[in-house]
Amino acid sequence: MLIRVDPASSRGLADQIAAQVRAALIDGSLVAGDKLPPARELAAGLDVNMHTVLRAYAALRDEGLVELRRGRGAHVRADLGPSDRERVALRRQVGELVERAARIGITPDQLIAEIREATS
């Protein structure tokens, strides 16, 4: 799995790393049980602080996508199934929708109202 970051991006480095892991889960290049690159090695390869990588991994853990094991590294949850990958893809699309709405001046509350109207 190849991870790249853009230091000039307005998106934080940890967010970029986590987003690329999520994308790999969505497209199937990462599957249940796979080991993520060690934080120290990934940080060195990306020329970022190790804590940045650990912050990305912690976010993925908090989302229920990876398990962090002391001394054994980060692994994609062994019980991660197709519905979990679909949830990750949906969360990504929602994030893109929120960003798009903000660009055209729609507030989160207005967006929620639009979604409610569309589903009623």
Image (spheres, grey):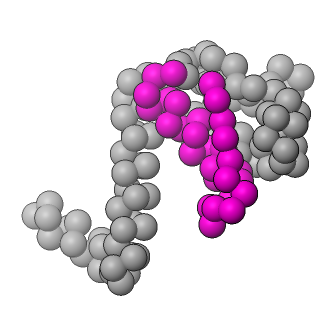
* 69 to the left or right of 78: right
Nearer-the-camera pick, 118 or 1: 1
Q: Quadrant of residue 104?
A: bottom left
Q: Height in image: 120 above or below 70?
A: below
* 21 to the left or right of 111: right
The percent position of residue 13, horizontal first and vertical second, equals: 71, 54
Magenta stretch bounds: 1-29
Residue drawn at x 14%, y 64% as measured from the top left: 118
Quadrant for the C terminus in the image? bottom left
Residue drawn at x 53%, y 38% as measured from the top left: 22
- Does the image show residue 54? no
Q: Is residue 11 magenta?
A: yes
Q: Height in image: 52 above or below 1?
A: below
The percent position of residue 20, horizontal first and vertical second, equals: 58, 40
Q: Is residue 24 magenta?
A: yes
Residue drawn at x 76%, y 48% as measured from the top left: 55
The percent position of residue 107, horizontal first and vertical second, equals: 37, 81
Quadrant for the N terminus in the image? top right
Q: Quadrant of residue 62?
A: top right
Residue closest to the far left: 120
How many callouts does the rendering have? 0
Nearer-the-camera pick, 71 or 48: 48
Q: Quadrant of residue 115?
A: bottom left
Q: Height in image: 77 above or below 49?
A: above
* 108 to the left or right of 23: left
Nearer-the-camera pick, 10 or 68: 10
Q: Height in image: 111 above or below 95?
A: below
- Does the image show residue 32? yes
The percent position of residue 36, horizontal first and vertical second, equals: 70, 25
